């Protein structure tokens, strides 16, 4: 332990067991890996945090990447750039796009996947993509561990540490990811859109759609997804407008989560995506 300009005290564990013990003894500490999100939100050029810090750079167990036939497993302390480089031939396209949208190259060198998912003040770029892919995360505390579906991860207890992310391999035929704005500095003007779909002979068999980067919420319209599942990729004009109306009604009835700007951009993206579906089908026919 040592003093530092970032906080009152910094702890530097050298193993996962040591980290979990420290977390149990000091549950109010800040877990610090790359620190990119925390530093960007500080307005002081020489930031100082009122709480102690546990620095994770020495915990090698958090820096491992493992691949099996069924899934890709990534340690929470793996930098975003390393994930992109190591997984360039196996990462789902939408996830690769989401990771590439995280800050600048310098930020991606430092930012970790665990930091992006575990940010307490909101959902950042990778969350909605990994959620739609049915990813699970491991949460550990001293003497215990549990795996949780990312979509059901409402909170992490004060003594738990997010240690691993497991991403199932699945053949998503259509993948889209777009992000606008900065969810850290300008959350009211920030949005992300993720679409994953499976197709069979020109028919959508499974479609998932999420609007993210809106504070702590990730929005899905089950009615919109259900309507499109079973439809041909070449939507008719009537089907396109019906789908837009379903989503527009969903967005307009949301209270408190979306600003007028975010609602407008969400509907615009849906219109673009549905037209893109027709173009994909015409191109591949």
Image (cartoon, rainbow, N blue to C red):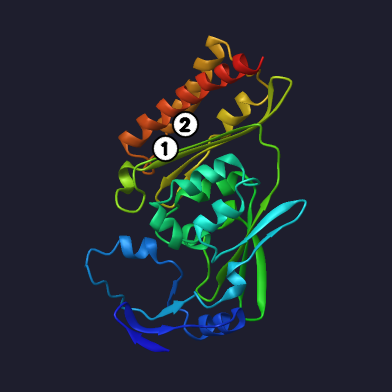
Question: Which is more toward the observer, 240 or 5?
Answer: 5
- Label 1 sits on a secondary structure element that is loop
- Kindly identify the residue that appears in the image at 56 percent across and 55 percent down: 83
Tell me, yes or no, whether the two marked residues, 2 and 1, touch with CB atoms within 8 Å. yes
Residue at x-position 55% and y-position 51%: 84
Q: Position of residue 22 (x, y in %)?
A: 52, 84
For disc 1, the neighbor class at 10 Å (few under 14, some 14 to 19, many from 20) is: few
Question: Residue 236: x and y, percent?
Answer: 57, 11
**Residue name at image x 55 percent, y 40 percent:** 94
Residue 63: image quadrant is bottom right
Q: Residues within 10 Å of mark 2 (few under 14, many from 20)?
A: some
Outermost residue on the bottom side: it is 1
Q: Nearer the viewer, residue 137 or 89?
A: 89
Quadrant of the rendering where the C terminus is positioned: top right
As drawn, 1 above or below 29: below
Q: Is residue 91 left or right of residue 176?
A: right
Residue 92 location, x and y as percent? 62, 43
Quadrant in the picture for the N terminus: bottom left
The Cα atoms of the two marked residues, 2 and 1, are separated by 7 Å
Label 2 residue SS = helix
Q: Would you say residue 28 is visible in this rendering?
A: no
Relative horizontal placement of residue 253, taking residue 202 as reference (left or right) = left
Q: Which residue is mark 2?
A: 250
Residue 171, labelled with which disc? none
**What residue is pinned by disc 1?**
254
Q: Is residue 194 visible?
A: yes
Answer with the quarter of the image where residue 49 lies.
bottom left
Where is residue 206? Give x, y as percent: 67, 32
Please determine whether, in this image, residue 130 is positioned above or below residue 275: below
């Amino acid at each position: 332990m040592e003093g530092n300009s970032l906080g009152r005290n910094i702890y530097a564990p050298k193993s996962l067991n040591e980290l979990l013990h420290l977390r149990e003894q000091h549950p109010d500490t800040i877990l610090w890996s790359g620190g990119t999100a925390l530093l960007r939100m500080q307005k002081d050029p020489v930031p100082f945090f009122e709480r102690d810090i546990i620095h994770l750079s020495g915990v090698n167990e958090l820096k491992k990447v493992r691949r099996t036939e069924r899934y890709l497993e990534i340690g929470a302390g793996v930098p975003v750039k390393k994930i992109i480089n190591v997984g360039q031939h196996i990462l789902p396209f939408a996830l690769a796009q989401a990771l590439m949208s995280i800050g600048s190259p310098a930020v991606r060198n430092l930012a970790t996947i665990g930091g992006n998912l575990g940010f307490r003040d909101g959902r950042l770029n990778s969350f909605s993509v990994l959620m739609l892919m049915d990813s699970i995360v491991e949460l550990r505390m001293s003497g215990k561990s549990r795996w949780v579906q990312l979509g059901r991860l409402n909170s992490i207890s004060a003594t738990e540490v997010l240690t691993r992310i497991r991403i199932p391999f699945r053949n998503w035929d259509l993948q889209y990811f777009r992000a606008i704005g900065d969810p850290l500095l300008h959350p009211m003007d920030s949005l992300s859109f993720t679409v994953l779909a499976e197709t069979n002979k020109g028919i959508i068999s499974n479609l998932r759609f999420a609007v993210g980067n809106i504070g702590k919420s990730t929005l899905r319209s089950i009615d919109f997804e259900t309507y499109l599942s079973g439809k041909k990729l070449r939507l008719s004009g009537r089907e396109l407008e019906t789908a837009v109306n379903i989503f527009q009604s969903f967005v307009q009835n949301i209270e408190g989560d979306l600003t007028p700007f975010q609602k407008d951009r969400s509907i615009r993206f849906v219109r673009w995506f549905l037209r893109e579906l027709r173009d994909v089908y015409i191109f591949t026919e």
